[in-house]
Image (cartoon, helix red, strand yellow):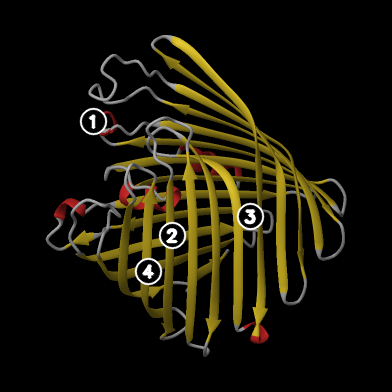
């Protein structure tokens, strides 16, 4: 709120400013055969998931302010222990100058690990409430008509409710990067990036897990250099690719003795899209190799494949197919490497430009290395009603 008030004073009233509100509503029901994606005994659950939100916006030719509150309240019949409340607040600001653009994006989110951990890492640790705060300022500077510099910084703080009792660990994640982009032609760009990140883990393990407090807070530092790539497109196809080197240093305190490991690794990825049938069908695919934090206080090396098809059957009826393959690994002893697979199909029918109904089916599997071949699978059938896209605005 302090940031919002300060920026509101800085972005003084201007002639021609547009004030707008775009509400959003989604109500869905789902039947989930294994909501925790676990190999332990489990029941099929039935849930009702309402979600509401809105984008409140003030915009002029050079300044933009956005506020976006959201609330989601899943409820599961006969499984009240799965119920939780999730809410968030996003704030965004942009200031445009002749050759430079300054942006600030900040958000607060309270959710459940039941959603966040599976979504980001393919792992479900324990079902707990998780609070995350992100602040991300950025700056873009046009050096010439064909050259651009981008600077960015992200601060992320993640805390878990009752983390000490669960074995999960709170952490802070910083990322700073600089990118130089050059237009090779009207349709192709080349770029180079340098990135630095720091991952700090709090020492808050359960005394039963770490009775002698042997494991103190740890720090992992990653530097990505020589990351280069291109982006290109034509009337039907678009694509991008990048590759680079990663240098990592991990420092841990074990029984009061500081241990340090370092190493060099690779970082690469690509994405592509193609339009069929005069744009009515679109294929998208991507691969990326990255290093990301997880809820149990480790950094995961992650390889991820995504592919999907979107088809517009009529002006009102759309269909989507998607597939995701995720492999996560960590060098820590006792942490199992895992593979997560998910495929889904969705049909959506637009009642009018703003209201739509949809049905969705998803099948997911999670397997991990252990003495035996442990694999868990999940089937989800969902149907819902959505409202969004209609904007109420006034200019003054």
Left or right of 27, for residue 293: right
Q: Residue furthest bottom?
A: 314
* Secondary structure of residue under mark 2: strand
Mark 4–mark 2 distance (CA, rounded to whole Å): 10 Å
* Secondary structure of residue under mark 1: helix
Residue receiving disc 4:
362
- Label total for image: 4
In front of the other: 194 or 271:
271
Residue receiving disc 1:
165
Mark 3–mark 2 distance (CA, rounded to whole Å): 51 Å
- Mark found first going from the N terminus, 4 or 3: 3
Residue receiving disc 2:
341
Mark 1–mark 3 distance (CA, rounded to whole Å): 52 Å
Q: In which quarter of the image is residue 309?
A: bottom right
Which residue corresponds to the image point at 33% horizontal and 63% vertical from the top-left? 51
Quadrant occupied by the C terminus: bottom right
Residue 13 in sight: no
In front of the other: 78 or 159:
78
Residue 19 in sight: yes
Residue 49 screen position, x and y as percent: 28, 64
Which residue corresponds to the image point at 23% horizontal and 30% vertical from the top-left? 165
Which residue corresponds to the image point at 52% horizontal and 46% vertical from the top-left? 302
* Secondary structure of residue under mark 4: strand
Quadrant occupied by the N terminus: top left
């Amino acid at each position: 709120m302090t940031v919002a008030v300060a920026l509101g004073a800085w972005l003084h009233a201007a002639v021609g400013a547009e004030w707008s509100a775009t509400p959003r509503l989604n109500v869905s029901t789902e039947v989930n055969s294994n909501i925790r994606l676990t190999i332990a005994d489990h029941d099929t659950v039935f849930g009702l998931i309402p979600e509401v939100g809105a984008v409140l916006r003030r915009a002029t030719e050079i300044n933009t302010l956005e506020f976006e509150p959201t609330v989601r309240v899943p409820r599961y019949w006969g499984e009240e222990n799965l119920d939780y409340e999730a809410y968030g607040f996003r704030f965004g600001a942009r200031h445009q100058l002749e050759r430079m653009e300054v942006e600030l994006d900040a958000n607060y989110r309270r959710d459940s690990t039941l959603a966040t951990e599976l979504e980001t890492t393919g792992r479900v640790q324990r079902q707990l409430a998780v609070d995350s705060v992100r602040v991300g300022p950025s700056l873009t500077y046009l050096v010439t008509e064909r050259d651009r510099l981008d600077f960015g910084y992200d601060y992320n703080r993640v805390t878990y409710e009752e983390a000490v009792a669960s074995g999960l660990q709170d952490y802070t994640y910083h990322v700073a990067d600089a990118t130089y982009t050059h237009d090779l032609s009207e349709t192709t760009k080349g770029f180079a990036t340098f990135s630095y990140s720091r991952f700090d883990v709090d020492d808050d393990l359960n005394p039963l897990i770490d009775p002698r407090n042997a494991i103190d807070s740890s720090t992992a530092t990653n530097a990505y250099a020589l990351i280069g790539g291109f982006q290109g497109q034509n009337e039907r196809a678009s694509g991008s690719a990048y590759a680079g080197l990663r240098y990592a240093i991990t420092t841990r305190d074990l029984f009061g003795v500081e241990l340090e490991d370092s190493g060099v690794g690779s970082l690469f990825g690509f994405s592509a899209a193609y339009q069929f049938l005069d744009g009515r069908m679109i294929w998208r695919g991507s691969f990326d190799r990255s290093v990301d934090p997880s809820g149990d206080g480790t950094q995961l090396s992650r390889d991820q494949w995504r592919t999907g098809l979107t088809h517009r059957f009529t002006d009102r009826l759309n269909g989507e197919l998607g597939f995701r393959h995720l492999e996560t690994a960590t060098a820590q002893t006792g942490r199992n490497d895992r593979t997560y697979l998910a495929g889904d199909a969705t049909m959506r029918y637009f009642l009018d430009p703003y209201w739509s109904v949809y049905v969705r089916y998803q099948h997911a599997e999670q397997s991990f290395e252990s003495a035996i071949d442990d694999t868990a699978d999940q089937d989800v059938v969902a149907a819902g009603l959505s409202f969004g896209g209609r904007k109420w605005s006034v200019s003054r």
